[in-house]
Amino acid sequence: MDTLHLPEEILEEILLRLPVKSLLRFRCVSKSCRSLIRSNRFIKTHLQKSRSRRRLESWYVIFSSNSENPNLKRCSLRSYVTDPFVNPLPIDDPINDHLTAPIVIVGHSSGLVCILDLPAASFFLWNPATRVSIQLPKLDCDRVAKYGFGWDGQSDAYKVFAVSSKKNKNEDRSERVANIYNSKTNSWKTLVTPGRLDLYSFVGEFVCGKIHWLVKSEYIETFDLKSEVFGRMEFPGVVFYPRFAVDGERRGYLTLVYDDHDNAVRRVWEMEEYGVESSWMEVASCSFRHANESTHLAWRIDQNRELKFSPRDNIVDCDHRHCYIESLVRPVSDNDA
């Protein structure tokens, strides 16, 4: 029986429609398949198509644990949204052998997740779908006080922002230094200023090429990964201690969630035109008067732009959650075509 040979362009189009798990198996079919799937061009095109289809199956919710065990948990975004009995499972991955609790999920972009091992003050870039991770070069510091992660589209580099703190031996104070890691060079460089440090959360949110931090109840501090310059955005009206939505990358908007405790209402604001403060819109709201009885509360905006709460009582021992897309993106840069 003759072997069926498909034209390369047709084979590529078929492979581009497959999920990451299937593509990892197809790498073993032939050298040509392996070469195609490993190429930067294929990896980028596959990511673009996964994003454009907007299928929930491509997205996962990852949780960091509250316990002394640093193991991470995850579930599909679809099950998180639709299944009231969803129970995130521990992720069996080699990265667990290199982490010590507590850990922080610094951020995510294009399928890569950045993790900070707090006791060791060490950063990791990790692709949960391919189970490939790298430990970043160690900063000379005692601890890390502010951090963020994202992608610089101009240089096609993944960058980590970190304010490191080290105790001065001769004085009773700590010296704080701002650093930026570049995946193209696999190295850190020092920046002139660390920006604001009186933050509501030290974890920055990456949207539209910039990392964002909430400065108490005053404004949003931004850091442009391309120009490496700080900026400022005002909050939408009167909000106190808002937080960023967990699926900002999927939605493509800078999104704030604000709990109006005076009226027992959760409000969701989106910046519909990034960088234009007048484009802040309250896109959804809902009473949470009885919602806090649940151990864990999932929420989503339905097709009618109504905010829906869904109790998830099986989700326990979980801290912060992030929503990432599965991809083939490698944590370290190479020169493949």
Image (spheres, rainbow, N blue to C red):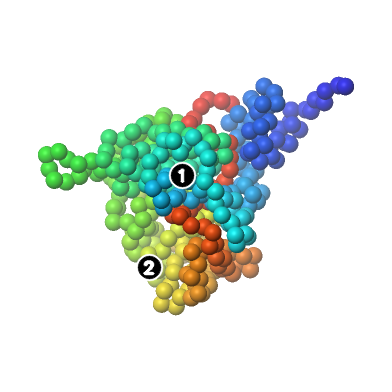
Residue 68 lies, in percent from the top left, at 39, 48
Circle 2 SS class: loop
The residue under the point 61% across, 55% down is: 79
Q: Residues within 10 Å of mark 1 (few under 14, many from 20)?
A: many
Residue 82 in view in this figure: yes
Q: Which residue occupies the extreme right position in the image?
A: 1
Q: Position of residue 186 (x, y in %)?
A: 41, 30
Confirm whether residue 160 shows in the render.
no
Q: Mark 2 = which residue?
A: 240
> Where 146 falls versus 188 (above or below)?
below
Q: CA distance from mark 1 to mark 2?
A: 33 Å
Q: Which residue is mark 1?
A: 71
The mark closer to the camera, 1 or 2, is: 1
The residue at the point 82 percent across, 23 percent down is 3
Q: Is residue 252 left or right of residue 165?
A: right
The residue positioned 49% from the left and 30% from the top of the image is: 333
Q: Nearer the viewer, residue 125 or 225?
A: 125
Question: Residue 189: x and y, percent?
Answer: 33, 34
Earlier sequence position, callout 1 versus callout 2:
1
The type of residue carrying mark 1 is Asn
Q: Amino acid at mark 2?
A: Phe
Name the foreground residue: 47 vs 264.
Answer: 264
